[in-house]
Amino acid sequence: MILGITGNYATGKDSVAEILQSMNFFHVSFSDLLRQELYHRKIPVTRDQLILIGNELRERHGADILARKALEQVQDGENYVFTSIRNPAEVKRLQQRTDFLLINVTAPDAVRLQRIVHRNRENDPKTLEELRSKEKLENSSNPNAQQLQTVAGMATVELRNDATKEKLQEKVQKLVADWMFKLQDQRPDWDHYFMNIADQIKMRSNCMSAKKGAIVVKDRMILSTGYNGTPKGVTHCTAGGCPRCTSRHLGKIKSGVYSEPCICCHSEENAIVQAAYNGTSTNGAVLYTTFTPCTMCAKMIINAGITEVVAKTKYPDDVGTKLLKEAGVRLRVLN
């Protein structure tokens, strides 16, 4: 999971990050990304310079640049805490992930001021008026600037830090326990799982027509696969092996005209033949294909005992579709 931390001055954002680090979360600070840029340019690191360089990077590379840089560090199966998130575009980019949660850490103004005075940093505000004035600087209407209040409003969870660090630790541990199972990537359903595989299989196609892929599945197990292209041992279509495809790409015939023989096999055809080659029965199986079958492939599907076809895109061949329907083969097109 990735937990994003936002909040005003002295709410305890760093304390939350430290607690998460003690729970084996990897810490990625957007401010540290900006510090690295200032170090690279040999510019002194100050709060004002961090704001300026952040605004510059967002203007040059897009308002979500820091989120994109942070995500480059993320590895599957690990937990991360992202801090110093200050722009809505950064949040929107992170919220595209199902494993991201934005937390707004809050505390009463009086408590925050007490913490600021206690840490006694040179440029920190000393009164509530100074604190609120300084925070206004981080709430610009410029889409490429800092917009802390807008970011805070985008948080899913508010974590109130108005007591001891021990109480905060209890709250953080409970938050992780409450969300750890909710922030897992959603698995695709079986239809989309198998169609995604068919989409990858089509990349092996050696035909100069549209790349197509198919798989034959039974009891949620893959029996065989196929993609369109020339038969085994025959010069690939992409190397001139198919006279019709060559003529079509030379502009001598139009798409859909078969005045010259096409020697390319279709993906459904190859998937069925491959099953037969390996002695695997396709009776009662489901065929997943990136295009609805043509007439020839529809006939093979029917005679192979396949009972259902799931397709991604409609192929302009009503004859094949009608044959499947008449033979009782169910046809579905995924949305």
Image (tube, helix red, strand yellow):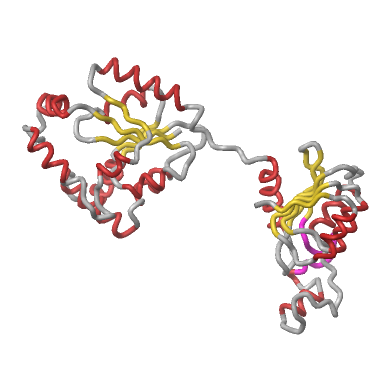
Front one among 331 and 22: 331
Which secondary structure is most common in the magenta stretch?
loop
Q: Position of residue 208 (x, y in %)?
A: 72, 69
Front one among 308 and 235: 308
Q: Position of residue 234 (x, y in %)?
A: 84, 65
**Which residue range is magenta in the image?**
227-237
Magenta stretch: includes residue 234:
yes
Which residue sits furthest bottom? 252
Visible in this render: residue 42?
no
In the rendered image of this protein, does residue 77 appear above or below residue 211? above
Q: Position of residue 184 (x, y in %)?
A: 52, 33
From the viewer's perspective, is 187 left or right of 256?
left
In the rendered image of this protein, does residue 212 appear above or below residue 14? below
Front one among 197 and 291: 291
In the rendered image of this protein, does residue 305 appear above or below residue 19? below
From the viewer's perspective, is 114 left or right of 278?
left
Q: Residue at x 21, y 50 (%)?
A: 140
From the viewer's perspective, is 235 left or right of 142?
right
Visible in this render: residue 256?
yes
Q: Position of residue 139 (x, y in %)?
A: 21, 46
